[in-house]
Amino acid sequence: MAIAFNRRPGIVAYLTAGDPDLATTREIALAAIDNGADVIELGVPFSDPLADGPVIQRASERAVAHGTRLTDVLGLAKELRAARPSAGLVLFSYLNPVVRMGMKTFCEKAAEAGADGVLLTDMIVEEAGEYLEAMHANKLAPVFLAAPTSPDARLAAIAGASQGFVYAISRTGTTGTQQSIAGDASELVGRLRQFTKLPIAVGFGISNAEHVKAVGEFADAAVIGSAIVALIEKTAPAEAPAAVGRFIAGLQT
Amino acid sequence: MSSMAAMVNPAGPVTSAAGRFGVYGGRYVPETLMAALEELEAAYAQAKEDVAFQAELDDLLRNYCGRPTPLYFAKRLTETLGGAKIYLKREDLLHTGAHKINNALGQGLLARRMGKKRIIAETGAGQHGVATATVCALLGMECVVYMGEEDMRRQELNVYRMRLLGAEVRGVSAGSATLKDAISEAMRDWVTNVRTTYYVLGSALGAHPYPTMVRDFHRVISKEAKRQIMEQEGKLPTAVVACVGGGSNAIGAFYEFLDDANVQLIGVEAGGRGTALGEHAARFQKVGGGVPGVLQGTYSYVLQDDAGQIAATHSVSAGLDYASVGPEHAMLHDSGRATYTSCTDDAALKATVTLARTEGILPALESAHAVAEAIRLAPTMAKTDVLMVNLSGRGDKDMGILARELDLRGA
């Protein structure tokens, strides 16, 4: 199990694979790891990313438009695992590309690529029987999302089914920036603690060092997504790895 | 356990879990929505059993919407085609011009009962948006309707109608700027405002309990039709034909006949411009059609590429232009209880003209797909056969398209 947070708060960096292209995503991921990201969440681009805000939606559209497929993302995961054996690596996807490949096949390939875990954004615990079976058979960590709207009974089920870490959504809404970390987040993490000893990562709207510091007061790690993807969007591909590296390093000061 | 088995192997075991139609249906949504779906499921279960709720719904359906709608014998069309007797279930005569009001009213009353004051909806052809805006005006609720910009262009008149009724219409430019993208945007709004907002989903789609609930609100179509055809013909119809976008009018027209094995049920999908992926919205088409997958909360047939990206669709009728289909239809398709065919844009346009000139009725372009199938089928049937077509909506909203398309064809 390579999902470990080496400092508090740990950093989970989300990247949309294939934006701007797979080779650049690889370099960006390496720069993120080398500058302090504990876990890379490698996003499988999808045509209809309904849990995401406009920034990640645009990245997904760009990556899909130039043909990035789930098999390419698995290939990229394999390269990252070879290059940085001890970094945490979680595949992040909507269900349909996975269902199209076949759940069992996907889990086998994810394990073969060296992924530590998988997060399926539209998979809820009640529907996850077969998914969990395939994940366990391949020694992969299923990461489930917990929301501020989840009642305690659901949080118990989510915490019980998760491995690696639990992903706490900081507020209702889609991915994207926010001004400050909502009180929702600390309350949710507090409720989750009753049900798990796993690390808890907080995401959705975490975009700067101040946010990361605030998350560190009550959670184990911060997930940074849209802020990184927006930086990649406005930076020339050749400059993007260094820019993301500096950004990640700056989050922990 | 068995739900994902369904995904690995679409012919997998049937589950008895709530919200499943055979292996289809279920709930595949961001976690943030789960509490709201559970709340909705419980509220609907209570309302369904509540005599006062049902009485208010029945009263408004009758006195506000105009139910029961007539079952009309299309004598001239029947004589022209020279085969089965054709009856039209006149959902086009309902208030706001389509069957959509049945569901919008039911869900609007449910939202009020749940104490929600802000309503969101998505719309393709605009009929569901107009119905929801109407119900919100009636009940004094705030209404926001998401609509793809391509559909706003195609259905300009309905955009004005919604605005006149007090709704805010928000254009969606993402993706193909059609119904699928409007649903995604409505779900984003719902995820963000889930504590205060009720999402009036417009077809028998999405996560449980929507497919069941929307079907229940449209069951009235076949309930009335069954009684009416017995009164007029003294027997059940040989076949019931309905167009299928998301599938709400079709499931409403089919439902009370499901146990009548001798009644053929025929769904008509949008065949668009051709059979290649991207040129149509025929999810059940054998070649170039859909395969089971997950889109917008439910497991059903989905038009997609071999990497699982959702395919572009095309139909002259905005209301049928959708990449997936209601999960109950997926079950009926697999079991063979209903058959699904498709009709091209051209055939639908021709059927519109035929019905207009034989009966003085302008069907919505969606409904014209069902009419086209009846026109194809009736001459192959005996004069003693009875063909019932669900005329789901009227064609006023399509005047702009008809003017352009029919002029191009020199009609």
Image (cartoon, helix red, strand yellow):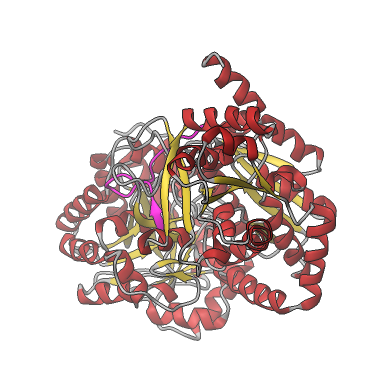
Tell me if residue B281 comes above or below residue B406 in the rendering: below
Q: Nearer the viewer, residue B256 or B37?
A: B256
Q: Is residue B53 visible?
A: yes
Q: Nearer the viewer, residue B361 or B246?
A: B361
Magenta span: B300-316
Percent of width and height locating residue A127? 41, 72
Identify the residue at image location x=76%, y=71%: B54
Residue B94 horizontal side relative to residue A250, left or right: right
Count of numbered circles on the image: 0
**Quarter of the image where one finds residue A34:** bottom left
Q: Quadrant of the N terminus of chain A?
A: bottom left
Check residue B302 for magenta coloring: yes
Residue A23 horizontal side relative to residue B20, left or right: left
Q: Is residue A170 visible?
A: no
From the image, give the main secondary structure of the stretch colored magenta.
loop
Identify the residue at image location x=43%, y=52%: A225
Identify the residue at image location x=75%, y=57%: B68
Percent of width and height locating residue B97? 72, 43
Residue A231 horizontal side relative to residue A150, left or right: left
**Residue extending furthest bottom?**
A194
Percent of width and height locating residue B389? 57, 47
Residue B179 horizontal side relative to residue A56, left or right: right
Q: Quadrant of the C terminus of chain A?
A: bottom left
**Quarter of the image where one finds residue B365:** top right
Q: Nearer the viewer, residue B170 or A42?
A: B170
Tell me if residue B260 comes above or below residue A60 in the rendering: below
Tell me if residue B218 comes above or below residue B185 in the rendering: below
Check residue A38 for magenta coloring: no
Percent of width and height locating residue B48? 69, 74
